[in-house]
Amino acid sequence: MADIKNYTINFGPQHPAAHGVLRLVLELDGEVIVRADPHIGLLHRGTEKLAETRTWLQTLPYMDRLDYTSMIPSEHAYCLAVERLLGVEVPIRAQYIRVMMDEVTRIKNHLLNIGTHALDIGAMTMVLYTFREREDLFDVLEAITGIRMHGAYYRPGGVYRDLPGQMPKYQENRFKNAQTVKELNEPRNGSLLDFLEDFTERFPVYLSEYHTLLTDNRIWKQRTVGIGVVSPERALQLGFSGAMLRGSGVEWDLRKKQPYEVYDRLDFDIPVGVNGDTYDRYLVRMEEMAQANRIIKQCIDWLRKNPGPVITDDHKVAPPRREKMKGSMEELIHHFKLFSEGMHVPAGEAYVAIEHPKGEMGVWAVSDGANKPYRIKLHTAGIPHLAATDEMCRGHMLADATAVIGTIDLVLGDVDR
């Protein structure tokens, strides 16, 4: 009888778990994965090259489009790199706002990951719960930046504007009756900080609901325990970072090991896994949301008590206030020059990395003294994690490929860049 040969199939990009632009070429022996070959390049984002033809400020919104589920922290890494080249000081209030918004985004990112991961594996209910909470956080982002997703809120030298004094409210319409609108608007009667504080009080209850639905669910555990195991040593060799690295038991978090902004003033813990499997990485992300909630509470408390400027007063970097422009021709010239030509960044190079929700996000910025970057090189967590797909899938069943893609927390915008 002739030998039965392995066969090859495409997993994605049409498969719902492949996020629309991921193609895995799987070599199968029956239903067992022998090799997984990830193909990238279906998105054609080109962010690094685009940056060379845009001013330093015009490049910032492109950072939002890298990981389009965790927009704000990518801006953060870019701004820190530009600030290092400029040598500007960021006001302390702006630093607290940045940290708070990074942690809001961390929760938002993990809610999406856990909800859609469970959905890909077959648990429908989780994504309905997690998207409920994400709506509140999108409302926060919209109140601050004016838009739900790509806010372009951070600026070299601080943030675009201070936190709003009130939250937008729902209006009665054909989809929402008066009683529903009243209930939705109850936490929106105060400032943004009031609304966010109300969310942090409610969020531990939501987390316990997620644990009830998933953590001890035997089907969830059958699909995740022992799947995609990566040892601590191998995780380091593969270049893992973020929850992927901590899930393997390596306690590495840039917020603790290489603190930036005001993280060294805040009290929070770093969760780590034990077995390095998909289930451990899920538990790490769940606990990271609880710790992010702690950080947000501390930021809210500080921001209530400490008003102040939210962007540098160096008018070669940030525009002067409108009242200053009306009384000074010099300030008016600074304003026009900044918005027509852009700021000139001193020649040099800088690399800055932050603890992005997906892992380490680094920006290497090179300036030749002009108003545009000479070179921007991005280090994102997606590529090393995607590169490990082959190793994590081998020996598992075809259905387990979905669990592995979900545990990577992959967004192709920050892979094909």
Image: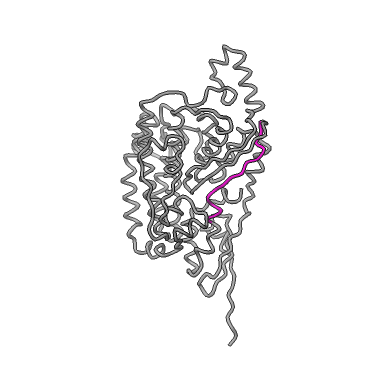
Image quadrant containing the N terminus: bottom right
Question: Is 338 placed above or below 72 here?
Answer: above
Give the x, y percent position of residue 392: 49, 63
Tell me if residue 369 is in the magenta stretch.
no
Please indicate whether residue 260 sits to the left or right of residue 198 in the image: right
Magenta range is 371-385
Q: Quarter-wise, where is residue 165 in the image?
A: top left
Residue at 59% in and 17% down:
331
Give the x, y percent position of residue 332: 61, 17
Which residue occupies the extreme bottom position in the image? 1
Question: Is 192 placed above or below 243 here?
Answer: above
Q: Front-most of 120 and 50?
A: 50
Number of numbered discs on residues: 0
Residue at 54% in and 40% down:
352
Q: Quarter-wise, where is residue 49 in the image?
A: top right
Question: Is 379 placed above or below 327 here?
Answer: below
Residue at 54% in and 63% down:
390
Which residue occupies the extreme top position in the image? 327
Give the x, y percent position of residue 321: 53, 19
Please indicate whether residue 100 sits to the left or right of residue 385 in the image: left
Tell me if residue 374 is in the magenta stretch.
yes
Q: Front-most of 233 and 324?
A: 233
Please indicate whether residue 44 sits to the left or right of residue 30 in the image: right
Colour mapping: one colour
Give the x, y percent position of residue 362: 54, 44
